Image: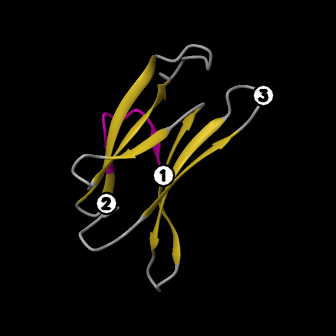
Amino acid sequence: APLMQKRVQLLVVESHEMAADCGSAAVTILGTKPGGTVGPIAMVTNSCQLVAKIGADGTSLQLTGPYYGSNAPLCCPTKPNATAVLRYVDGKWTQSPNYFKVE
């Protein structure tokens, strides 16, 4: 998907790590880094689940998963089906609303 600019293709990978609780999930965006190597250029993580879908405009990612407030236990998400949009704007990744951890 051309998430950063036109004619630049990126690969979006979803992963889930199992654990005794609900585990953790990540969406990793892979692209060409300086020097021509391919590697992660952004990662979004969340407890339990995180699903990515290319936005209707083709230049954003729609992220869906449970949102946990700062004191929420894993059994009880603050918002069970939160959705945020991730975009590359002015040289950085921005998320709105800010539900998940962007690295």
The picture places residue 34, in percent across and down from the top left corner, at 43, 81
Q: Amino acid at mark 3?
A: Ala
Mark 1 or 3: the one toward you: 3
Residue 19 sits in which quadrant? top right
Q: Earlier in the sequence, mark 1 or mark 3?
A: 3
In the image, residue 5 sits, relative to residue 95, either above or below, namely: below
- Is residue 98 shown left or right of residue 24? left
Name the one closer to the observer, 92 or 32: 32
Q: Secondary structure at mark 3?
A: loop
Give the Cα distance between marks 1 and 2. Answer: 16 Å
Question: Is disc 2 placed on a helix, strand or loop?
Answer: loop
State the mark number for residue 103: 1
Q: Which one is earlier in the sequence, the residue at label 2 or at label 3?
A: 2
Residue 3, numbered circle: 2
| Whether residue 91 is situated above or below residue 48 in the rendered picture | below
10 Å crowding of disc 2: few (<14), some (14-19), many (20+):
many
Q: Quadrant of residue 97?
A: top left
Instruction: Tell which residue pokes out farthest to the bottom in this image.
Output: 35
* Residue that extends furthest to the right in the rendered view of this protein: 20
What's the residue type where badge 1 is placed? Glu
